[in-house]
Image (cartoon, rainbow, N blue to C red):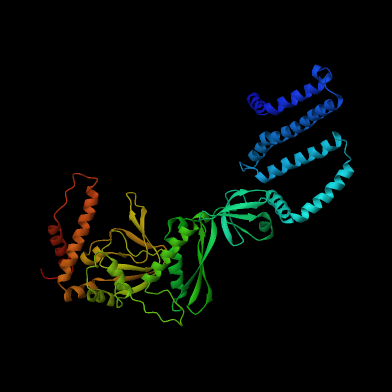
Amino acid sequence: MGAALARLVWRLGMPLALLTLSIIARTQWDQAPFVAKLDGSLQDKLELSLVVLQWMVGGWLINKGFALIVWPLATRRNGGAPVPKMLMDLVALMVWLTLAVTMAAVVFDQSLTALLATSTVTLGVIGFAVRELISDFFAGIALSIEKPFAIGDWIEVDAVAGKVVDMTWRAVRLLTTDEVTIIVPNGNIAAETFRNYSRPDTWFRDELLIPLPFEVTPQQGQRILLSAVTQIPELAAHHRTSSVSIAEYDDRGVIWRLLYWAPDFGRLSSIRFAVHTNILRNVHMSGLRMPVPMEEIRVMRSSLGAELSSIERMLKTSPVFSALSEDDLAILARTAEQRVVPMGKPILHQGAPGSSLFLLNEGLLCVSVATADGSHTQVGQIAPGHVFGEMSLLTGAPCGATVIPAMDSLITEIGKDSMAELLNRRPLVAETLSRILAERQGQTAARMAAGQDSMEIGDDQGAARQMLGRIRAFFNMPG
């Protein structure tokens, strides 16, 4: 307590010293030798100057006391929230105005009635000339009292969104996501409805309108849109869920409304980009195209070939089947089976025998592995467009993990019979697939050997021959 008082006295040292000296000078005024040598008018002017100095030092001390004692105390009581600068400036102005009026009445013997009458007329003329500034000033006072936003909040007013970086007696300064400073008068904020994206917390609900073709079913639309949000871990972990609804119909198709919870307005642009990217991928992997107005005619060519179906395109993206020709892919796609799997029902069980390959068209799948204590740990997710189960389809290898839908999902299954038909027609395909599988296993072994110097990696040709033997044995092909 003593140290704090000492620091306070030290900070007030200069104005206290001036006040003390002026009081001593007035007390000893009549006894000062040099005063007697001055004429009466000069003595009166000097004495009046000392009185005015005392009043000004007093006002300085009052404002300094607010700055050193009152405002820090108010900040602590508000949980660390700083006192608005405009409020501090207003208090300082009121102190000086009160001091000026009192000094005019006490020191200069002016009539308060005449002074107020004159000041009223003057203020009326000035107020009419600067009425907009006065409106902004009082609007700023109202905003400081109500505190609908604080420094650092993201707000949107006059169709402009930005972070509040400063608030003065006239305007609020916003910094947009493009690092552009926007000055909004206080009167505009007080008169308009504005949105605060940072209160009651930084999470807020964002809305996206997405057109989808008329042939999209309600269940399909939900899978495409909801999985686009769920594929982003930060959004999926939030306790409030996303929702979809139909907004309207137009000449392009059905306009869907996606509502999801975004964590921070400052990152909204990157979050929207991630959501839109997932939506476009989901639409593409579903075999759909983003709709265009029906009166327009557009010729669209896929880089993978106009004749490829969505199943063939997905197989083409798999490293195992990318080397196959379009005819080979068509054989696999022709006998593929597509079905909807409900949320929570496992598609694959770890350790169970497998003989199928799966493609995820819509939705989201969770991949988990069993631990030593018998529980399961999630190790990843499968997003639309991914292919899994190649080893089971080609060699009958048991499933290496458990795959469970995180939501109702649409999958495509290619079984052993489909692969057998392809191998019967194209026996050389087995050699191509065996080399690719051997290369993938070699790459996996190399990554593991990076941290284990003692691990030895076999030759690629030997691994390819072993893989070819497993494929031929599984499909009863001649050697």
444 sits left or right of 141 in the view: left
What residue lies at 75% left-to-right and 33% top-to-bottom? 56
The residue nearer to you, when weighing 449 against 159, is 159
Q: Position of residue 371 (x, y in %)?
A: 33, 51
Q: Position of residue 238 (x, y in %)?
A: 49, 56
* Displayed quadrant of residue 435: bottom left
The residue nearer to you, when weighing 77 against 14, is 14
Q: Is residue 179 visible?
A: yes
113 sits left or right of 455 in the view: right
What residue lies at 65% left-to-right and 61% top-to-bottom? 193
Q: Quadrant of the C terminus?
A: bottom left
Q: Is residue 477 above or below residue 264?
A: below
The residue nearer to you, when weighing 359 against 163, is 163
What residue lies at 83% left-to-right and 22% top-to-bottom? 38
Q: Position of residue 94 (x, y in %)?
A: 76, 42
Q: Is residue 6 above or below residue 100?
A: above
Q: How many marks?
A: 0
Q: Is residue 413 above or below residue 178?
A: below
Q: Position of residue 151 (x, y in %)?
A: 60, 48
Q: Furthest-left residue in view?
A: 479
Q: Is residue 476 visible?
A: no
Q: Is residue 402 above or below residue 12?
A: below
Q: Quadrant of the N terminus?
A: top right
What residue lies at 38% left-to-right and 72% top-to-bottom? 286
